[in-house]
Image (cartoon, rainbow, N blue to C red):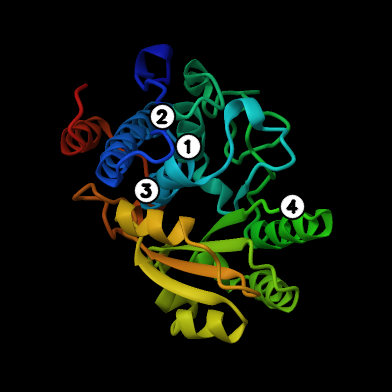
Amino acid sequence: MALTADAITLQPVVRPAVGAPRDEVLAFLADTARRIRLQDLALVHFAGAGHIGGDFSSADILTTLYGAVLNVAPDRVDDPERDRFVLSKGHIAGIYYTTLAAFGFLPVADLATFLAPESKLNGHPNRLYVKGVEANTGPLGHGLPIAVGLAKSAVMLGSSRRTYVLVGDGELQEGSNWEAMMAASHLKLDRLTLIVDRNRLQQGATTAATNDLDPLADKMAAFGMAVHEIDGHDHGQLLDALSAEPTPGKPTGIIAHTHKGHPISFMSDNVAWHHKVPNAEQYAQAVAELGGVL
């Protein structure tokens, strides 16, 4: 079994026009997220590696950001006024590359090189290799501090651009995140949005069993964040939260409640699927559950 061009079936998509009816936008996001999951599933299955559980818990967040929220485009990746997005949980590179390919930031055909020797699409995103990647990530706890720096630079330059960063909930066991939240609050970085993929699982265990984060919203608020809790698989809630005007003087913290492996029946909320690869039978079942064809 190997990942080849035959496994790449994703077609690039075009974002709905600004001002498009809400129902049209939400239908687009739902279908695009489904297609992105299908392609990412093939990458992990045929490459024999990846983080499918976290990929799928974050898929709706990434789709909503690139499909309806971020002020960025493939032909504007060097525009100083573009929004910035940092994927702190860099191990979900498969779904990130697939999302970037869907929205035209990299050729869809390049997905066939995922995790291949010397491929630019390695296990963690590299900004020198992939257009649209703002920061190299992988070691957890680094993305939010980088995003704080990006948001502070916008203030210093008088820019109205926004900075978004996606972290995993297990990653919040790293103290650097809390130092960054405290700094962002002190600096009044209200154009910064922290998104927590709150799937309550990490490698090998639940977050509660490892280092309980609750009450997470209260803790983030105590560090100066304007906190909102949403369903991280509801595109309407994601769209509203991610595109809302920020609270003046406060960085935004969005706790997106998700399910690892969503929406696949045998993956969802199953810690084994943090780093597991579906076999042929499981792959076929997951494809069917996503409404796809082999």
Height in image: 152 above or below 36?
below
Of residues 20 and 152, which is closer to you in this image?
20
Please report contact status of discs 2 and 1: CB closer than 8 Å, yes or no: yes
Secondary structure, mark 1, is helix
Crowd tier of the residue under label 2, counting other residues whose Cα lies within 10 Å: few below 14, some 14–19, many 20 or above: many
Marking on residue 159: 4
Extreme residue toward the top, this view: 6
Amino acid type, callout 4: Ser
Q: Earlier in the sequence, mark 1 or mark 4?
A: 1
How much space separates mark 3 and mark 4, taking CA atoms?
Answer: 28 Å
Crowd tier of the residue under label 3, counting other residues whose Cα lies within 10 Å: few below 14, some 14–19, many 20 or above: many
Specify whether residue 203 is in view: no
Displayed quadrant of residue 17: top left
The residue singled out by tag 1 in the image is: 94
Marking on residue 43: 2
Marking on residue 60: 3
Of residues 191 and 9, which is closer to you in this image?
191
How much space separates mark 3 and mark 1, taking CA atoms?
Answer: 14 Å
